[in-house]
Amino acid sequence: MTEARETITEAKAVAHNDMANAIRALAMDAVQAAKSGHPGMPMGMADVATVLFREALRFDAADPSWPNRDRFVLSAGHGSMLLYSLLYLTGYPGMEIGELKRFRQLGSKTAGHPEHGHAAGIETTTGPLGQGLANAVGMALSERLLNARLGDDIIDHHTYVIAGDGCLMEGISHEAISLAGHLGLGKLIVLFDDNGISIDGPTSLSVTDDQVARFKASGWNAVAIDGHDPKAISAALAKARADSSKPWLIACKTTIGFGAPTKAGKASTHGEPLGEEEIKGTREKLAWPHVPFEIPEPVLLAWRAIGQRGAKERTSWKLRLAQAGPAATAALAEPAGATRSAAVAKAIAAAKTAALADEAKRATRVWSQLALEHIVPVLPELIGGSADLTGSNGTRTKHHVPVAKGSFAGNYIHYGVREHGMAAAMNGMALSGGLIPYGGTFLVFTDYCRPSIRLSALMRQRVIYVMTHDSIGLGEDGPTHQPVEHLAALRAIPHLLVMRPAEGVETAECWEVALQHTANPSVLALSRQAVENLRKSPSDENLSAKGAYVLTEPEGGRDVTLIGTGSELALAVEAAKTLGKEGVRAAVVSMPSMELFRAQPESYRAKVLGNVPRVAVEAGVAQCWYEWLGDKGRFVGLSDFGASAPAPKLYAHFGVTADAVAEAARSLVKK
Ligand SMILES: Cc1ncc(C[n+]2csc(CCOP(=O)(O)OP(=O)(O)O)c2C)c(N)n1
């Protein structure tokens, strides 16, 4: 404690410029050493970042995952050296100077763009411009949700973002800004690096938006300041922190590559090393005589003191948490963790029992809603939502209460027609901790969420995408709304679980899988049209969790295996019956998830698929199916876009029928 107090005294003695120049030097030297990277942005935003960390950001480098820390998101992820410098200077565990020397090298913590999980303190993976800003909206929303549940003593923090021109030009920024303004997320503070430069040159080449007016129009407070004036930065941050009525934009006028004698203010500093000569000149101009990667002790100590600034607050927070009792601690621990597992298992069992007893034909989106009716009451950390398709997606249950500006005790988000913003916000919510977000839209619009779905998978976050209207089976809305290539495209994303349940029991099982996989996002692909329940006998085991299983096995051995997913599993069942009458013995395999099946032991996979010819049926493209069909297998599906017509007519028109499945099987068995 005494040591910390001493260093804090020293911190005050070190001039702002020296503190900021430490960032500039580390950034330019690391980029030079790596022979690649982006020095301009960190050099330009060093003043803003210094004031933010020195005065405003509540954090304790010794405990990077302290739940009530302020979040800092570097949305302009190409400026990663800004973040790495700050993590090193403030003393985050594991971020040694060697990591900065190994910037962008294999196995280092300092990847080209900040990768969540590579180093403590990287709140989210950024690089695809605009994503960080939209993640931050989810983090700020999470903060309000947890605040409403746990109170000011436990969760009450800010979320800060550094965003560049690029982030604000991206379409996703519109969705994110609009949603944050609508919900009045007043603890969100965006620092805009208004340097007027992007890769092609001055931003005037491509954009003339008045950002301050734009943010104000979306319900934000917005001010413009000189981003190199520490007093102005300090005053703006203080004002923004004091007024949480609306989110804040602080537009910081900066010079990209600040300090570089001939290149400052030019696009050439954006994404390439400055070069030895320019670096020499920068050292002179900034009066920074130190050799690369050397930070003079007083400056480093001052930065380290900043890293300890929050220690006292964290300690008293821990006491408050202990006083709040075990429920508060559990709420901030792993969502749906040990304390919930028995209740969730019971809820899933109840949903399965109800589905087994239900003789009605229902869409799997309805089965999903019915499963949620059981799950939601026992899982308060589950936060539902939809991008304006609540009724269609079946995402809202009778246990849901919508969230609104100033009213965050609810558990359902009306994201509006903002699919991309929804997906990115859900990433931010999952990253924040304590909550499990799920959100719905039509499967075809996974295209509108795809960059964020990819990041859910890259960051290994448990985000659940409820994607309904999953095939031509949606009918009359026509080919714009009918996914054809989407299942294949989603299955191509590593670590993403794509699950397409066929009926009621499977849908409940797939929800269980999605909740249990803490390090995977899931897509639940659900039908618009009603399907028959095909699982007739109760099973305590979650068969869908194996990815594929034998639904029906003919007596006396198999001649052929018919594989189906989702609404087309019923076609395989019907085809098997037809074939049976002809003396062809067909087994039916349900394959709700290729990823889960791939993870099974080889022996299980061999048993399920059988050493016989195979036919698969799915109302989508063939891609990825031949992994299961082999050279000799046949696929019954689509090879073109759909059409507008009633669903049964479309299935007949495109030849996705039980007859086609039976015919494909006959042709293989005959050979
Ligand atoms: C979605 C996306 N598109 C394109 C890029 C490639 N890119 C990286 S930085 C950048 C320009 C960003 O300009 P700005 O935000 O002004 O950054 P600055 O030049 O100030 O560093 C581009 C196009 C990207 N990273 N993400």
Image: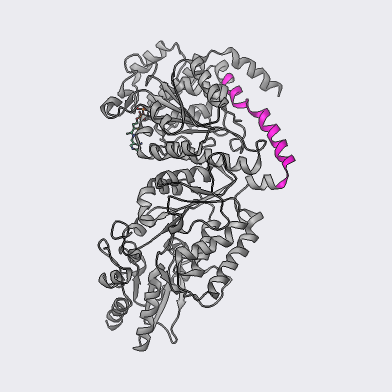
Q: Position of residue 557 (x, y in %)?
A: 42, 84
- The front one of 181 and 383 is 181
Where in the figure is residue 610, as x and y percent of width and height? Answer: 41, 76
508, above or below 462, in the image: below
Residue 162 drawn above or below residue 657: above
The residue drawn where x is 40% and y is 69% is: 567
Q: Quadrant of residue 253?
A: top left
Q: Quadrant of the N terminus?
A: top right
Query: What kind of colouring is applied to the model shown?
Result: one colour
Q: Is residue 316 magenta?
A: yes
Q: Is residue 477 magenta?
A: no
Which is the main secondary structure of the residues drawn in magenta?
helix
Q: Residue 329 location, x and y as percent?
A: 68, 45
Q: Which contiguous range is marked in magenta? A: 302-326
Q: Is residue 664 left or right of residue 299?
A: left
The extreme right residue here reads 323
Ligand 1 location (quadrant): top left
The residue lying at 47 percent from left, 36 percent from top is 181
Q: Look at the image and tell me whether residue 202 can be seen.
A: no
Q: Nearer the viewer, residue 266 or 346?
A: 346
Q: Quadrant of the C terminus?
A: bottom left
398 sits to left or right of 524: right
Q: In the figure, 496 relative to 502: above or below?
A: above
